[in-house]
Amino acid sequence: MSLNAPDVKPPDCPESAAIGQVQLLLAEKRTSLAALRTGIAVFALPLSVLGLLVATSKYYDAAEVLHFLLPLLALSAALAALGAWLCVRAALRLRHEDRLIRRIKARCSSLAELIEE
């Protein structure tokens, strides 16, 4: 029997290639989760600094230390923006990777029972 016989159909989904693709996407998903964790930490830092400033505000006069407060508030705003950007970017990437895994799962029925969602 030759490989070009009409009754022999090639598999619609090579299982080893699909498993490799899913493994790659799961590695990318772990990277996105690490970026999300980093974004949350970067976002939380300015909030804790501002909380400390509010808690100790009775010990200083804001007008006297304005030259320290303004750069600190600007840096806090920049860190909060960076943290928010990292979180949003990671969340969008996670959704994209989940969509790709779902597409592979739909294409390869033998993997569908192995991959849970």
Image (cartoon, helix red, strand yellow):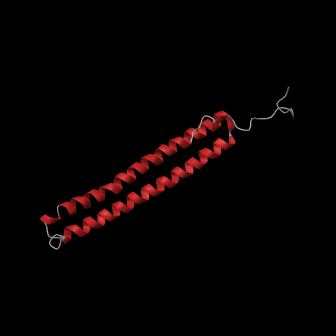
The location of residue 45, given as percent across then percent down, is 30, 55
Q: Is residue 55 left or right of residue 22?
A: left
- Numbered disc total: 0
Which residue, as the protein is rendered here, is positioned at the far left? Answer: 59
As rendered, which of 93 and 115 lies closer to the eye? 115
The location of residue 59, given as percent across then percent down, is 12, 64
Quadrant housing the N terminus: top right
The location of residue 103, given as percent across then percent down, is 64, 46
Q: From this view, report whether residue 98 is shown above or below residue 58.
A: above
The location of residue 22, given as percent across then percent down, is 58, 40
Q: From this view, report whether residue 84 is shown above or below residue 12.
A: below
Q: Is residue 92 left or right of residue 80?
A: right
Quarter of the figure with residue 42 = bottom left
Residue at position x 56%, y 47% in the image: 98
Q: Is residue 68 left or right of residue 11?
A: left
Which residue, as the protein is rendered here, is positioned at the far top? Answer: 1
Q: From this view, report whether residue 66 is shown above or below residue 117.
A: below
Quadrant housing the C terminus: top right
Quarter of the figure with residue 78 = bottom left
Residue at position x 77%, y 35% in the image: 10
Residue at position x 38%, y 53% in the image: 40
Q: Is residue 110 left or right of residue 32?
A: right
Residue at position x 14%, y 72% in the image: 64
Quarter of the figure with residue 86 = bottom left
